[in-house]
């Protein structure tokens, strides 16, 4: 492993981060019989539209594929390994990273197809980067971890990964302007991460997503037949959320998706504009298949 060209004190800090994250250096062999467990990750919650951004670091919400690097393996949230090329893996540092494999706005399908393939295609992988938004398990608050990520990227001459750009917003008006700009440019929305928050897996009050549309997941219960122009095609899906709310989704599908709809039992992602008092999503629209491992 190439040593980092950084001051001793900062090198010691990186070593401390690696120790705190319990990572293994690239090139080490996993212990015999080891099986990959699903990595613990921090999860986003839906932000209120009137959230006050003061005290948060704000970044663009990237529409990529979640990937966690533990110093030895690059894995999906499910724990399944990502079949990345050797040159990509070897360029990652000996510190745990949490991020998204990303190839630019509006390229989720292409990125997903590349990273889910068992055979790494160099040409397609060279269009991807691991956009890192945290150091899982590292000590210090998020502001400190963000600064450390930036220094680590410089010190390791990062070529296949980058820290996600973080900025502070002085008020709600500035936050709304940033959101509008991202959405106009084809982005999904924003992420707000409390600058003073320690790293913690799961959902918390420190990490929020802010989008013009909400999104959620539901399981397909049945296919309803189409009528008129949609005769002989799927007209709508009957779905159920994890909390047991049942409803139908009849919009957002292409004709190809209506000809070959998501199978019964599978999970989908959908967008909506809030919920009714009884919990039913308003204006629910199909978005894409949901793969829990991504």
Image (cartoon, rainbow, N blue to C red):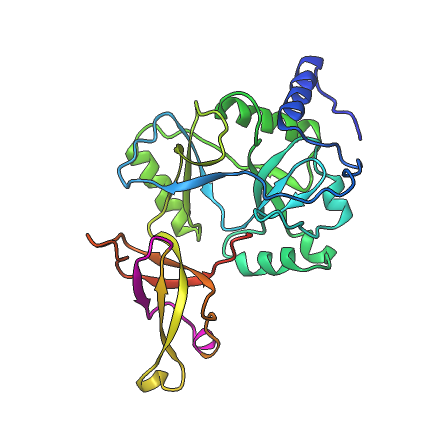
Residue 107 visible, this orientation: no
268 in the magenta segment: no
Of 173 and 75, nearer the camera is 75
Q: Which residues are magenta?
A: 242-258
Of 32 and 150, nearer the camera is 32
Residue 16 point in image, percent of width and height: 65, 20
Residue 263 visible, this orientation: yes
Residue 156 point in image, percent of width and height: 71, 30
Q: Residue furthest left?
A: 277
Residue depicted at 67% across the width and 60% down the height: 117
Residue depicted at 47% across the width and 70% down the height: 262
Q: Quadrant of residue 99?
A: top right
From the viewer's perspective, is 7 left or right of 212?
A: right
Q: Quadrant of residue 280?
A: bottom left
Of 102 and 258, nearer the camera is 258
Q: Residue furthest top?
A: 9
Q: Quadrant of residue 48?
A: top left
Residue 237 point in image, percent of width and height: 37, 70
Residue depicted at 31% across the width and 84% down the height: 227
Of 33 and 177, nearer the camera is 33
Quadrant placement of the N terminus: top right
Count the marks. Answer: 0
User: Does 134 appear above or below 287?
Assistant: above
Residue depicted at 65% across the width and 31% down the height: 153
């Amino acid at each position: 492993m190439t040593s980092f060209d950084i001051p001793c004190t900062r090198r010691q800090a990186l070593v401390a981060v690696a120790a705190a994250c319990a990572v293994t250096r690239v090139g080490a062999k996993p212990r015999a019989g080891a099986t990959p467990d699903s990595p613990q990750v921090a999860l986003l919650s839906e932000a209120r539209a009137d959230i006050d951004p003061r005290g948060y670091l704000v970044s663009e919400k990237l529409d990529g594929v979640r990937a966690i690097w533990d110093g030895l393996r690059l894995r999906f949230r499910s724990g399944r390994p990502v079949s990345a090329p050797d040159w990509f893996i070897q360029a990652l540092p000996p510190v745990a990273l949490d991020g998204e494999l990303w190839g630019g706005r509006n390229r989720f399908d292409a990125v997903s197809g590349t990273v889910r393939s068992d055979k790494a295609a160099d040409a397609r992988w060279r269009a991807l980067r691991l956009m890192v938004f945290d150091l899982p398990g590292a000590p210090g608050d998020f502001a400190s971890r963000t600064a450390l990520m930036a220094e680590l990227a410089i010190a390791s001459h990062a070529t296949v990964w980058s820290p996600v750009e973080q900025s502070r917003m002085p008020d709600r008006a500035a936050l709304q302007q940033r959101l509008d700009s991202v959405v106009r440019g084809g982005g999904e929305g924003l992420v707000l991460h409390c600058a003073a928050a320690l790293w913690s897996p799961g959902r918390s009050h420190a990490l929020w997503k802010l989008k013009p549309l909400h999104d959620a997941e539901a399981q397909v219960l049945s296919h309803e037949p189409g009528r008129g122009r949609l005769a002989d095609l799927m007209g709508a899906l009957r779905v159920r959320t994890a909390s047991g709310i049942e409803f139908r989704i009849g919009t957002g599908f292409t004709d190809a998706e209506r000809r070959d709809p998501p199978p019964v039992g599978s999970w989908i992602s959908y967008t909506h504009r809030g919920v009714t008092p009884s919990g039913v999503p308003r204006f629910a629209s199909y978005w894409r298949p949901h793969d829990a491992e991504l």
